[in-house]
Image (cartoon, rainbow, N blue to C red):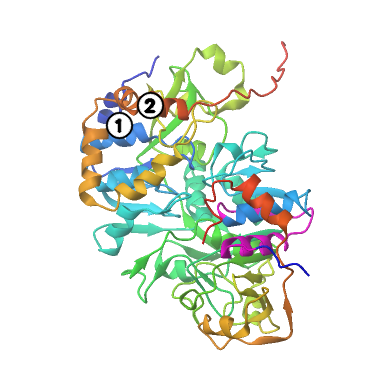
Amino acid sequence: MSKLLSLAEAIAKYVHDGDLVYAAGFTHLIPFAAGHEIIRQRKRDLVLARATPDLIYDQMVAAGCARKVIFSYMGNPGVGSLRILRAAIEAGRLEWEEYSHFGMISRLQAGAAGLPFMPMNPTGAADLERANPLIRRVADPYSGREVIVVPALQPDVAIVHVQRADAQGNAHLWGIIGEQKEAAFAARRVILTAEEIVDEAVIRSDPNRTLIPGLRVDAVCHVPYAAHPSYAQGYYDRDNEFYLEWERISQSEQAVQAWLEEWVYGVEDRQEYWARLGPQVHARLQVTPRPSAPVNYGQY
Amino acid sequence: MTEPPACSSSELMIINAARLLRDGDIVFVGVGQPNLACNLAKRTHAPHLVMIYEAGVIGAQPNRLPLSIGDPTLVSGALSVVSMYDIFALYLQRGNVDVGFLGGAQIDRYGNINATMIGDDYAHPKVRLPGSGGAQEIAAWARRCYIMTPHQKRRFPERVDFLTSAGFLGGRGERQSLGLPGQGPVGVVTDIGYLEPDETGELVLTALHPGKTVEMARQNTGWDLKVAPALRVTEPVTETELRILREELDPSGIYLGG
């Protein structure tokens, strides 16, 4: 049975006000198109979890979608600060819950495996444990030594962008694979967006590359360029100029709202957004092909 | 004797940081200046350096200057790409990383680092910083950690406002009692000189860059900075090091200014 939906349908059906949302992707394959659709549908009171909130959560917080963020590094990668999140936190307008990257990702790993918590070795830096009571210590029942534990994270909905998927949601992704697989297994509902929808035979030609199986996926949406201004390995480059531009835009509330008006509320979907970026940006983000050597699975 | 070539503070720090790496080291690299230091070392005295990036990339061979920790140029041609959980669990926690580079808004007397917030109340930060990312675990588990930071008084307080990454905590004995696998911060490269922990874990001035003075270092440190009896002067930067940095690694000067 096909799970193909438009992104607007998928967000309307599977993202509800108050949900805990995990939009996956460490720098790579960040599902910006889905974030923008959530903004357009004016979802409210979301708890937004991501290791690196990145511009996607800065924009969703600016649009008033969130009541809380859960994160482990709140910067504009390679540029500096996430100004909107930072200002909201400093002003006490936004709740937050904080981990190290390893703590954050261990929470997802536990959630994905159906375990109640995940242990980690101690680091000697205990201030975050004092600041966040969900980070605790237990005795290793074998050696008696203390380990740090974090509780499983099972988001209401995970949103994952991939290079290619079939209509059932069996998905190939490559390049930086961050925490997409863990998010898809941890979450109760999974929305997949894909650069390409391919025949099941393409997926079956390279089963080791299927990090997310269709059995975890609720909706599959064909959304080319969904990750811009982040990137899709082999499809288009990261738009570093926009990351720098956001640093400028996000200094003024007025500029942020004008940007949201033009690039989110003012477009119907990702196709219109991409067209509006124009041929110069398209050319700048083009990638020279560099295919891998094929592998031989053998005919048995 | 010819004058050493003129260079910026950033270039001075990057070049001196690069010299700390040993050929064959497996190094956990951050973007920006640490990335330049590692790539410079690889193109000079450490061709067998293995660069691991927090985004999950092992043995990266970047073709262009990576502008984020997850730049696609790190992936193409790398030895391996793994998940975030694997990079922290199998590589860092398992003890497969020799060197970590760290920075932070504050570094204190015992090499503890704050990258989380300025102020005295976590719940009401005066200035909210990005937070740990990978820094909490790198500081604990990489065998050797180096810190790079401009030498300014506000960056070197007596005590950090928030302990993001453990240095020697309240002194070397306290870190040792925890049995952390990494040795802790073994050196701090600044634009004035080089600090190293003494037997108590306190950072002391052990080297100055050419033309810098003890007075400059002491004035820009928030505690009563001790000076090692055998104070060295670092080797002047060379034309070769500067050429690689300026022409090959960061031709647009994105990280070299200042």
Chain name for mark 1: A
What's under tag 1, amino acid-wise? Tyr
Real-space Cα distance between discs 2 and 1? 8 Å
Would you say residue B20 sits in the magenta stretch?
yes
Q: Position of residue B45 (x, y in %)?
A: 79, 55
Percent of width and height locating residue B3: 71, 68
Residue at the spot 27% in from the left edge and 24% down from the top edge: A9
Q: Chain of mark 2?
A: A
Local SS, label 2? loop
Residue at 51% of width from left, 14% of height from top? A200
- What residue is drawn where x is 42% and y is 32%? A227
Residue A298 visible in this rendered orientation of the protein:
yes
Residue type at mark 2: give it.
Asp
Contact? badges 2 and 1 (CB < 8 Å): yes
Against B15, residue A271 (above or below) is above
| Crowding near the residue tagged with mark 2, few <14, some 14–19, many ≥20 C-alpha atoms within 10 Å | many
In-front residue for pair A113/A28: A28
Is residue B116 rendered to the left or right of residue A16?
A: right
Which labelled disc corresponds to residue B172? none
Question: Looking at the rendering, in which quadrant would you find the N terminus of chain A?
Answer: top left
Residue B217, percent from left and from top: 58, 81
Residue matched to label 2? A218
**Is B40 situated above or below B165?**
above
At a point 49% along the width and 37% down the height, the residue shown is A28
> For this rendering, which residue is in front, A143 or B124?
B124
Give the residues drawn in magenta, as a range. Answer: B6-32
Q: Position of residue B200 (x, y in %)?
A: 67, 84
Please tell me whether residue A105 is drawn above or below residue A135 in the rendered image: above
Residue assigned mark 1: A14
Work out whether residue A141 can be spotted.
no
